[in-house]
Image (tube, rainbow, N blue to C red):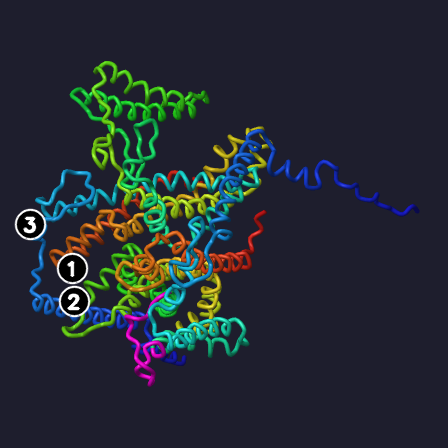
């Protein structure tokens, strides 16, 4: 019996994939460590040379500048920390307006792409292709400097029924001022929303169990308007209208939408709406034509085919795209700084940074805010996506 | 035996062919559609004639100063014509503009070369040329190192800056994003997490915040006394921003390459880099081309954001022109319209190319 030949089975040290990956990662780690060491030591040296103190103490010192528009009480005596809150709220305001309006515009234009009317189809295509391909900043400038700046002065305002006014200084409409007892109405609205939520669940369960349908939509409308109306009458209408009035050179009272907000919201809506329309178009096109034909052959009406067959399937394609469009809308809202709408970027990275010089802290806080906003959008949209996803059998 | 003879085709019924049934089908198929059609026509009839009149018929075309815009009811294209040199070249010295043109021609020539050269030369010539182009352009445009008159980056501007900056960013972003995408797919946990952090950071932060970081924070990072040119910092920021987005595009491309391709390359005994560069990368680029172009369109549009940090690209040149004391006649509509048309032509043609590539690659048999 001969001896087995001795074969050295393990490869040489450097050819072993495990050793190799360890070495590569060590190299990367050392490189990164050196890089960050360089940055940190340079930054510290530079900050010392320029006399910048690091830390977040500046948030509690008085800001001393006014902000064009604020959703919370704010004036120059408030702190830098409050300028952060004011800016954040303004960013959230314009993002919310933009997301809601661009979704509406986008869905209308996306569905219009499949209209039976040739002209409507062509208008949808023209809208998408025009506004998708023009830089957003240019569109903001166009609305702000070319369109809104051409509106009449306060004395010659355009008005609807002497209640809503539009002029070069903004859009004015009547506001509601709550008096005592308004809490009952707010409570009724909350109760109505909760009621609708439970009604829908109950109706769905009943339909699954017994097959009987319940007119959810009409009932929801009834609850949504009926309950607050009853509360209003019971509490003796605790609201008064606050009409805008021309006093001197400007309007007083009511709710004012400053032109900066209008221009930004318009541009974001029109620009993002074009992208959403494209997403909706792609989503609807991804639904096989056989689905529509099958729906027709079982006798569904054209309007029901869209609503019950095509759109639910298209949502699987649309929702992930919507997610990224919403996120880029929020990121694009930073362009407010070009026309001076006081969003987080304008107020905090602009004025506050200029006054305090705390570049690192401020840029870090701002980036963190946009990360958090975008992650929340992503979270909500992923939940929504899970609910429209194809339920596959395991 | 009788031979089978098919009957001649019946002509289509008269009420389905010709212009009148077409109009009926497309414009007046239902009462609601008829109303919509009429409303849209009425709208066009009221809007288009005055628009055409303002744009062309009553417009002022000739002259060099604002005084030449005599017709109040027409657009003042004199404004655009008088400023056109600044719109395209910024305040670059007039007698040196040939350098910008040279760079633009070089860019176009390399793009054409990468399509037209024979396959075996293409990779050896076009790719190195592409990678060298940004650096050669910088040498030519700044001029001091190659014996030409030095032009400081403060004078670079206009539409050519938008084009060159976007091109230079995507060229450098190509290899960088490819590495990041590879890192994200890697089995090495540390490499993978570094890549994910890089990609998600540059995708998640508004590009404006990145610009501000480049202009207020980057100077703090460098050793004291180093003065890094503003345009160079912007280029770095744009490149990193683009790399984040393109890495995700490449990741999609990697996922679309069938596993058999990797296995076949392994069984041939190719090493990692041979496999990746010779087998996988060409397929990845082919698959991701439409998305790369879409990302590039986004980058190109985003170059207008440079206005905010005070770089004289096309839009900020327009803003400067609009506030010029000799031209305070409210020409903003004309100016913006012109910039919009220029950008629209570029972006639209790129998205057309992108969708034609997409159609060519689409092998599914839907509809």
Disc number placed over residue A360 in the picture, else none: 1
Q: Which residues are magenta?
A: B139-158
What percent of the width, then of the height, locates residue B211? 26, 61
Chain containing mark 1: A
Quarter of image, res B284: bottom left
Question: Compared to B136, does A110 lie above or below?
Answer: above
Instruction: Label 2: state its secondary structure.
Output: helix
User: Residue extending furthest right?
Assistant: B1
Q: Which chain contains the residue that carries disc 3?
A: A
Query: Of B226 and B242, which appears nearest the observer?
Result: B226
Name the side, left or right, on which B305 lies relative to B3: left
Mark 1–mark 3 distance (CA, rounded to whole Å)? 18 Å
Compared across the picture, whether B304 is left or right of B343 comes to left
Image quadrant where residue A226 sits = top left
Can the viewer see residue B6 in this picture?
A: yes
Task: Look at the image and tell me whether residue B186 can be seen.
Answer: no
Q: Residue furthest bottom?
A: B147
| Residue nearest the viewer, comparing A207 with A45 | A45
Q: Residue at x 46, y 46 (%)?
A: A127
């Amino acid at each position: 019996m001969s001896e087995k030949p001795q074969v050295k089975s393990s490869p040489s040290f450097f050819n072993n994939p495990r050793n190799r990956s360890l070495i590569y990662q060590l190299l990367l780690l050392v490189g990164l460590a050196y890089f960050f060491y360089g940055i940190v030591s340079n930054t510290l040296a530079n900050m010392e040379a320029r006399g910048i103190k690091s830390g977040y103490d500046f948030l509690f010192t008085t800001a001393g500048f006014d902000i064009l528009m604020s959703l919370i009480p704010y004036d120059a005596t408030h702190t830098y920390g409050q300028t952060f809150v004011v800016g954040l709220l303004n960013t959230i305001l314009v993002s919310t307006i933009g997301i809601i309006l661009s979704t509406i515009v986008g869905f209308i234009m996306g569905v219009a792409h499949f209209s039976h009317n040739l002209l409507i189809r062509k208008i949808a295509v023209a809208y998408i292709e025009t506004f998708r391909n023009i830089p957003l900043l240019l569109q903001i400038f166009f609305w702000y400097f070319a369109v809104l700046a051409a509106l009449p002065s306060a004395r010659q305002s355009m008005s609807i029924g002497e209640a809503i006014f539009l002029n070069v200084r903004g859009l004015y409409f009547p506001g509601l001022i709550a008096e005592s007892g308004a809490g009952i109405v707010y409570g009724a609205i909350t109760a109505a929303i909760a009621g609708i939520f439970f009604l829908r669940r109950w109706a769905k369960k009943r339909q699954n169990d017994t097959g009987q349908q319940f007119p959810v939509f009409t009932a929801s409308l009834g609850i949504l308007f009926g309950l607050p109306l009853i509360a209003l009458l019971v509490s003796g209408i605790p609201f008064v209208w606050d009409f805008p009035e021309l006093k001197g050179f400007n309007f007083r009272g009511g709710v004012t939408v400053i032109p900066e907000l209008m221009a930004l919201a318009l541009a974001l809506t029109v620009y993002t709406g074009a992208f959403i329309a494209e997403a909706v178009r792609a989503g609807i096109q991804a639904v096989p034509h056989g689905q529509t034909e099958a729906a027709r052959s079982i006798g569904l009406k054209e309007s029901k085919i869209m609503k019950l067959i095509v759109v639910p399937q298209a949502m699987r394609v649309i929702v992930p795209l919507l997610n990224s469009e919403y996120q880029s809308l929020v990121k694009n809202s930073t362009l407010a700084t070009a026309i001076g709408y006081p969003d987080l970027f304008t107020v905090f990275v602009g004025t506050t940074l200029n006054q305090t010089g705390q570049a690192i802290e401020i840029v870090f806080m701002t980036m963190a805010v946009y990360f958090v906003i975008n992650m929340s959008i992503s979270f909500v949209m992923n939940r929504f996506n899970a609910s429209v996803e194809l339920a596959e059998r395991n | 035996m009788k031979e089978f003879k098919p009957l001649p085709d019946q002509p289509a019924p008269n009420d389905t062919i010709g212009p009148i049934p077409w109009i009926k089908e497309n414009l007046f198929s239902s009462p609601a559609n008829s109303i919509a059609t009429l409303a849209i026509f009425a709208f066009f009839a009221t809007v288009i004639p005055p628009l055409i009149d303002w744009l062309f018929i009553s417009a002022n075309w000739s002259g060099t100063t604002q005084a030449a815009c005599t017709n109040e009811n027409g657009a003042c294209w004199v404004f655009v014509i008088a400023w056109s040199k600044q719109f395209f070249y910024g305040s670059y010295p007039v007698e040196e503009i040939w350098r910008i043109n040279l760079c633009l021609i070089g860019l176009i020539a390399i793009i054409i070369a990468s399509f037209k050269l024979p396959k075996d030369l293409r990779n050896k010539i076009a790719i190195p040329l592409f990678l060298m182009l940004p650096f050669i352009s910088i040498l030519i445009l700044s001029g001091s190192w190659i014996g030409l008159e030095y032009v400081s980056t403060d004078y670079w501007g206009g539409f050519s800056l938008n084009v060159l900056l976007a091109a230079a960013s995507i060229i450098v972003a190509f290899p960088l994003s490819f590495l990041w995408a590879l890192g994200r797919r890697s089995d090495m946990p540390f490499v993978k997490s570094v890549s994910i952090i890089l990609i998600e950071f540059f995708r998640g932060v508004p590009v404006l915040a990145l610009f501000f970081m480049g202009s207020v924070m980057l100077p703090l990072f460098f050793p004291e006394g180093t003065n890094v040119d503003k345009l160079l910092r912007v280029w770095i920021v744009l490149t990193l921003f683009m790399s984040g987005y393109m890495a995700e595009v490449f990741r999609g491309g990697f996922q679309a390459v069938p596993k058999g391709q990797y296995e076949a390359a392994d069984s041939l005994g190719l090493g990692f880099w041979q496999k990746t560069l010779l087998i996988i990368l060409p397929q990845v680029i082919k698959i991701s081309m439409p998305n790369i172009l879409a990302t590039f369109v986004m980058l190109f549009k985003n170059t207008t954001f440079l206005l905010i940090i005070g770089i004289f690209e096309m839009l900020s040149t327009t803003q400067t022109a609009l506030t010029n004391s000799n031209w305070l006649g409210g020409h903003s509509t004309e100016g913006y319209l012109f910039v919009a048309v220029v950008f629209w032509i570029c972006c639209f043609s790129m998205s057309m190319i992108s969708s034609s590539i997409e159609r060519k690659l689409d092998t599914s048999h839907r509809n």
